[in-house]
Amino acid sequence: MPDQLDVHRNPGGNKTVIPFVVVVQSNQFREAARRVVVPLVAASAFGSPDSDVGPHFVIDGWTVVLDPLQITNVPWDVLGPAVASLTGEGARVVRALDILLSRAWR
C-alpha cells in the first residue's frame, strides 16, 4: 500500500504536465480506500522559482514542483508502485501544506 511521501506516476490524464503525485496522507489512515495526493507539476509548465509553497524536487530525471492548490484524492489501488520517496524532504512538503492551510492571512 502507498505510504506517506511516496511518489507515484500520475494515474490520471495530462501526464506531460503532471508526471507524478506524492501521497501526503498520514500512514495512520493506511487502511483507507483512498489516498490524499498532491500533484508534482513539471517545473517547465509551472513557471515559478523554488519557494516554500511550491518546492522543487527532482524525480526520475524530471524537475517538478509541488502544487498544493491541486490537492486531491485517488483510490490507492490506481497508484501503482512508488517510483521515489520524498521522506528526506518531508519538512518542505509539510511546510507547503501548512502555508496552504494557514489561518494567518484572515
Image: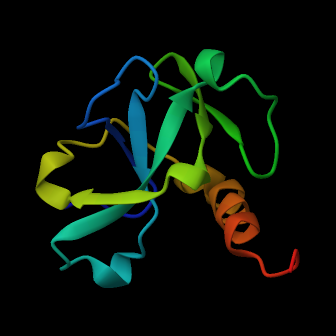
Horizontal side of 62 relative to 15 (left or right) equals: right
Residue 61 at x, y percent in the picture: 50, 16
Residue 103 at x, y percent in the picture: 79, 82
Query: Residue, x 65% and y 64% (percent of image)?
Result: 97
**Residue that sits furthest to the front in the current view:** 106
Horizontal side of 72 relative to 52 (left or right) equals: left
Horizontal side of 79 relative to 60 (left or right) equals: left
**Vertical side of 67 occupied by 101: above or below:** below
- Classify the position of the C terminus by image quarter: bottom right
Residue 98 at x, y percent in the picture: 71, 70
Residue 75 quadrant? bottom left
**Residue that sits furthest to the left in the current view:** 77
- Classify the position of the N terminus by image quarter: bottom left
Residue 66 at x, y percent in the picture: 60, 43
**Vertical side of 85 occupied by 34: above or below:** below
Query: Residue, x 47% and y 43% (percent of image)?
Result: 39
Residue 31 quadrant? bottom left
**Residue that sits furthest to the right in the current view:** 105
**Vertical side of 72 occupied by 101: above or below:** below
**Vertical side of 99 occupied by 38: above or below:** above
Indicate how the structure is coloured in the image: rainbow
Q: How many marks?
A: 0
